Amino acid sequence: MGNTKERILAASAELFRRNGYTGTGLKQIVSEASAPFGSLYHFFPGGKEQLAEEVIRTSGMEYAKLFDLLIAPAPDLVTGLEQAFAAAAVTLRETDYADACPIATVALEVASTNDTLRRATADVFGAWISTGTAAFTRFGLTEDASRRLTIAVITSLEGAFVLSRSLRDVEPLAVAGEAAVAMARELAAASGSGR
Amino acid sequence: MGNTKERILAASAELFRRNGYTGTGLKQIVSEASAPFGSLYHFFPGGKEQLAEEVIRTSGMEYAKLFDLLIAPAPDLVTGLEQAFAAAAVTLRETDYADACPIATVALEVASTNDTLRRATADVFGAWISTGTAAFTRFGLTEDASRRLTIAVITSLEGAFVLSRSLRDVEPLAVAGEAAVAMARELAAASGSGR
DNA sequence: GTCTATATCTCGATAGAC
DNA sequence: GTCTATCGAGATATAGAC
């Protein structure tokens, strides 16, 4: 039996991702989670902010696994990146352009308004950068090159999500993938030529 | 004398950019604009949604000018891109990581919740793509290459804004610039070698 | 721990005097 | 065209029975 707390977290994650932090109401959350309103404050005495912080951290860390899942088993760097961007495009279309980054909308909303939640999003992005850096070094990149490529991949994905969701078209996702691949080729060439 | 309507539009643009659509209240707007509450509904009988649509379109079109301003006068493609990303980094730091894209936060908020506003953001992104495509063809790129590079530049900027605002660090902006430049070099090489 | 009822506040929106 | 008062609905949060 998925307990009440987990249902609340799952419903919150979905609503925050699609409607944002200020755009999601607590009543909407307990309704979607089929949970009594009182339970929300039982499990999250800190209210909406505490709930959001847990959602950001848990769903953010969940998402990091995709890095290892998609990139690590690929035969080479470029193939891995192409598959990752293609997979993101499929998900986006299948969910009617709703399921993109789990924390991006909230991250922009809170960046200048709520430092507790801003730090939570920063920790998640930092974890993604660490995970990605480790994954890319296995393809022979230096630590520094791997870190920069990871950041480029994440920013390309995030930016493409903004445009693709707005335009309801996966073209930006495809083009952003090209940019990430272009940088990967450059870094691989610099590394491969022994510099 | 800047009239009341323009003060309301200016205050709304700033608040929507920093706090988002659902995160900004109408009373907050009229307070910031030093305008009477009734004037808001006098100028925008459609209420918050009409106001937001006008803000998205006007501040979005305003922003398109930066493309011509920053890229067009550059001696070459790579220099132009580097200057644009560097300028964005300066602005971001000077405004304490508040002033990035004028419509990105709202775009993510409304993408799955308000089709009228979603279309407004889509029109703005479409206009940016057209402006950028025209600007880049002057550097000798084909129409198709120019369009793809433009999309890559915009997605790189948007994604970097998400990470840089969250991390309060301009590193993502610098790295995203590298990715855009890498793609520009690739496209210029393909075009320059006569293919 | 679960659930309902409710307190308090702020929201977007409206009415109407001036 | 300006401004105030206020509406009803919804928000977050709390109290307290079970």
Image (cartoon, coloured by chain):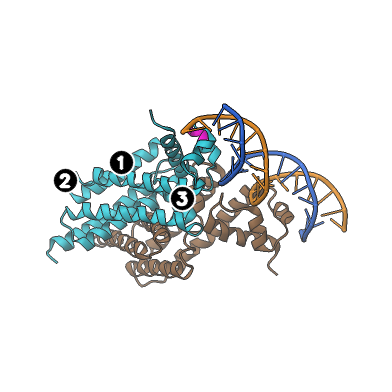
Chain colours: A brown, B cyan, C blue, D orange
Instruction: Choose the circle earlier in sequence order: 2 or 1.
Output: 2
Residue corresponding to mark 3: B106
| Magenta residue span | B30-34
The amino acid pointed to by label 1 is Ala
Q: Is residue B117 above or below residue A70?
A: above
Residue corresponding to mark 1: B87
Q: Tell me whether the residue at label 3 lies in contact with that at label 2, contact meaning CB atoms closer than 8 angstroms.
A: no
Q: Is residue A144 visible?
A: no
Q: Quadrant of the C terminus of chain A?
A: bottom left
In this figure, what is the number of numbered marks? 3
Instruction: Choose the circle earlier in sequence order: 3 or 2.
Output: 2
Q: Residue at x 54, y 36 (%)?
A: B37
The amino acid pointed to by label 2 is Pro
Residue A7 position by quadrant? bottom right
Which chain is disc 1 placed on? B
Does residue A38 appear to the left or right of B88 in the view shown? right
Residue A159 position by quadrant? bottom left
How crowded is the residue under tag 1: few (<14 C-alpha within 10 Å), some, or many (20+)? few
Residue B75's disc is 2
Q: Magenta includes A150?
A: no
